[in-house]
Image (tube, helix red, strand yellow):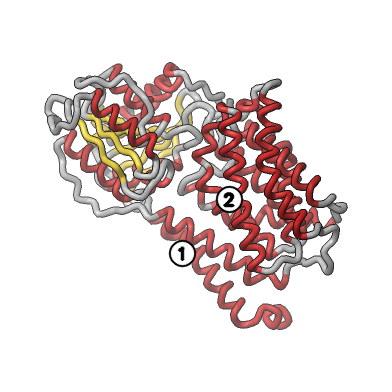
Amino acid sequence: MNRILVRLGGVRLLLLVIGLGLIGLAWWQVGRARQGLVVRSLSQDGIPLRFIAPAGATNQPGILIAHGFGGSQQLMLGYAYVLAHAGYGTMLWDFAGHAANPAPLDRTGDTLQGNIDTAYAALIAQPEIDPGRVALLGHSMGSGAVMSAGIADPARYRAVVAISPTGADVTPDRPPNLLLQAGQREARFAENAQQLLAEAGGSSTDFATGRARAFVLVPQVEHITILFSDISHQVALRWLDSAFGRLSGSDYADRRMVWYLLHLLGWLLALVALSPLLPKMARPANRPVRWRRGLGLALAPFAAAVLLALTNLLIDVASLGGLSVGGGFALWCLYMGLVWLLLGTRPGRLAAADLTWGVLLFAVLWLAFGALAQFVWLPWFLIPVRLVRWPLLAAAFLPWMWAAGLAQQGAGAGQRALWWLGQSILIPAGLLLTMQLVPGMGVLILVLPLLPLLFGVLTVAGGAVARPGAYAIGSALFFGWLVLAYFPLS
């Protein structure tokens, strides 16, 4: 033990203590969001549902909360907690093909409306809910679904909140009491919201007749971060209060995402602190010369875009492997990795130690990135129909991660930062080209803002476990799991 303490030194021990403290504090703070609430996990007609309401409440208004494409119950929890602390009963669910719902995705209106009807029946069956006072809230794909539900049955719902709205046949009378929100950094959705407002009759505060309409532009957010915006949460709450003629006195603000990021930082600090105890390769093996490493990264994302477009002429890559877009993304990454390896260097053989440390690295990444995400924003615990696809997806990511590990082998902190910057610029650029060449992959635009964070996490991990083989195995297992957690089943 004394030898370990000496190897770490005072600064690293301090980082370790801070990291562990952040991890523990984050779990405690995220758990506090449920205080004073009742939370029930339900299943009806094969649809996973979650009911959240004030403990001991009776005869309260109910809100159905619908997620968007690639979303889940978890991604919409911010609205559920804010509304529940303000006295509303809320019901969340996973649309077909999403998260814990094993049914394949069918984006037709009938399927989405059927899911909403099931959630509605489950909501009004809860003892806390007044069946005569129900409203809808939805994001992106879910926004179109809730607007359509309010149009089809305006007597059932008191109000509709559409966040980052898609399309619906709105009129001045339907849906009732329509609030539209969009982020300042999602121009296409903001323009669509303004068009919907005009079609719905323009701004109005006539809640009594159901003709109230408004559009709110939420500052400094885009398509995903709007879901964690205090402004978006509070605007929705005030609109629903007006629709139901009530005044909420809650001061709850959802800070779970802040604590999640601090939790992730805590794990990275702990990993950096413990890095002297982790394996290093004595000499770089098969390391390419500097210009070839850069050439591989510079060309591979764009070559992958062309190769995926050619593949799409033969098969529908957007539904490859039973994953909507996710399978095509994995194939794109496979192409990119193979091209990068071809232009850079041939990898050496994997050693037994690489497999051992790679699995351990995956375990750390799984805990650091995903364990708390299950309770904040991402359905991290995979259901069996997703889990069986994991080995194949991990194999698709292995060449890319191996090329990245070899390129960064022996690099210092500054050089690793440059590799992080290069991947954060060139890989999204290659994906943007892919979306132009393969229109079915366009939804990848939603995940581009997440990539720099992911590359940063992997860069820190690669610096701590400086074995390219171990880095490749651990990172590929992690990325495969992440893709399965996000993309819908097709």
* Location of residue 144 with respect to 378 vertically, above or below: above
Q: Quadrant of the C terminus?
A: top right
Residue at x-position 70% and y-position 26%: 311
Kind of residue at disc 2: Ile
Crowd band around label 2 with a 10 angstrom C-alpha radius: few (<14), some (14–19), many (20+): some
Q: Residues within 10 Å of mark 1 (few under 14, many from 20)?
A: some
- Residue 61 sits in quarter: top left
Q: Residue 324, relative to residue 28: is it above or below?
A: above
Q: Which mark is residue 258?
A: none
x 15%, y 40%: residue:
246
Horizontal side, residue 357 vs residue 264: left or right: right
Q: If the image is split into quadrants, where does the N terminus sit?
A: bottom right
Closer-to-camera residue (246/161): 161
Question: Percent x, y for residue 148?
Answer: 33, 21
The answer to whether one can see residue 302 in this image is yes
Q: Residue at x 39, y 40 (%)?
A: 186
Instruction: Residue 425: give its label.
Output: 2
Q: Which residue is mark 1?
A: 25
Label 2: element kind = helix
User: Marks 2/1: CA distance?
Assistant: 34 Å
Q: Nearer the viewer, residue 362 or 2?
A: 362
Query: Residue 140 location, x and y as percent?
Result: 40, 33
Q: Is residue 470 visible?
A: no
Q: Amino acid at mark 1?
A: Leu
